[in-house]
Amino acid sequence: MKIREIYDLAIASGIAADPRGEEAVRKELAKLNKTYDKLDDDEKEFFDVESLTNPYADSRILFGDQDREIKKLICGVDMESGEIAVVAMLNSRGVNIDLIWSHHPEGGALAALPEVMKLQSGALAAAGVLANVAEGLLDQRIKEVDKSIGVVNHFRSVDSARLLGIPMICIHTPADNLVTQYMTNLMRNEAPDTIGDLIKLLKEVPEYRFSAINHNPPRIVSGTKDRTVGKVFVDFTGGTSGPKEFMEKLSDAGISTVLCMHATDGMVDVAKDMNLNLVIAGHMASDSLGLNLLLDQVEKRGVEVVAGSGLIRHRRD
Ligand SMILES: [Fe+2]
């Protein structure tokens, strides 16, 4: 596959699994295209044209010719300079890795992480929270994340890849959408009665099983194993953790259990106050599951996949 084909497959898969629904995403893209057409030339100069077809600003081809044919790629949760140096060492030993795939965003895609957080209000609206309330609460949290990410050295890892001449991509929200869809279906199909049953169910999934064996099991941070699961909201995508107030609004909308990858202390406190069950599935296991669902598709098309940097690789049929 060419780099562009791998990237396009990931974006298309992310759209198909988007918690807002595919139609809402397409509508958003059409609106953005109209906005772009009306911009002046000097405004167009600073417009990220990739966003006209890819709704996920945290997922991009970061370095390399998009038409380059890829035979073997390495995928990891965080591919930073250390990991990139390892790739160069492997290549000097004849391993021939021709693409670095990071899950967590780097370069301009890292600077754009707050952009994808907007997905969260759409996901909450789909779960029954008033859209205006979700949007209002999210605005403040986006500003916080934007402020903290704005000062970091975004291009550090991409520069390492560029200096070593190894193409690099990052695919974040599409993979997180896929694990969200997988978990939502699992909860719907298996319908665990108690939080204890839910934890047991998670531990049957290979990625979580590996984490649990390695002392990082799914955790109940609000509620107990005897509590009733009720209606579940899977909070696995949208860049990073949302505002803590989302816990209260989800409870008001009839949600009994929030299943997330990771949670802030504020989210845990609010969940406890609301008697809302909050379960942390685990960050690396959840990121791995989302990536695995994409990597299986890439492997089927003839690309060899090497796992690194925390990726718990498990192949599914
Ligand atoms: Fe992550």
Image: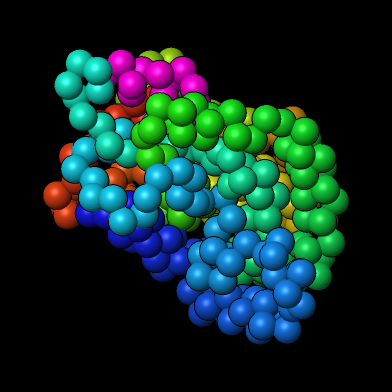
Q: Position of residue 136 (x, y in %)?
A: 84, 61
Q: Nearer the viewer, residue 297 or 127?
A: 297
* Residue 130 is a magenta residue: no
Residue found 78% across the figure and 63% down from its top: 135
**Left or right, residue 116 beside residue 248:** left
Tell me the colour scheme of the image.
rainbow
Q: Where is residue 204 in the image (x, y as percent from the top left)?
A: 30, 36
Residue found 61% across the figure and 46% down from its top: 108
| Residue range corresponding to the magenta coloring | 78-90
Q: Nearer the viewer, residue 299 or 286?
A: 299
- Which quarter shows the N terminus? bottom left
Residue found 54% across the figure and 64% down from its top: 50
- Magenta span dominant secondary structure: helix
* Residue 87 is a magenta residue: yes
**Left or right, residue 46 beside residue 308:** right
Check the image and report above or below for 117 versus 281: below
**Left or right, residue 54 beside residue 92:** right
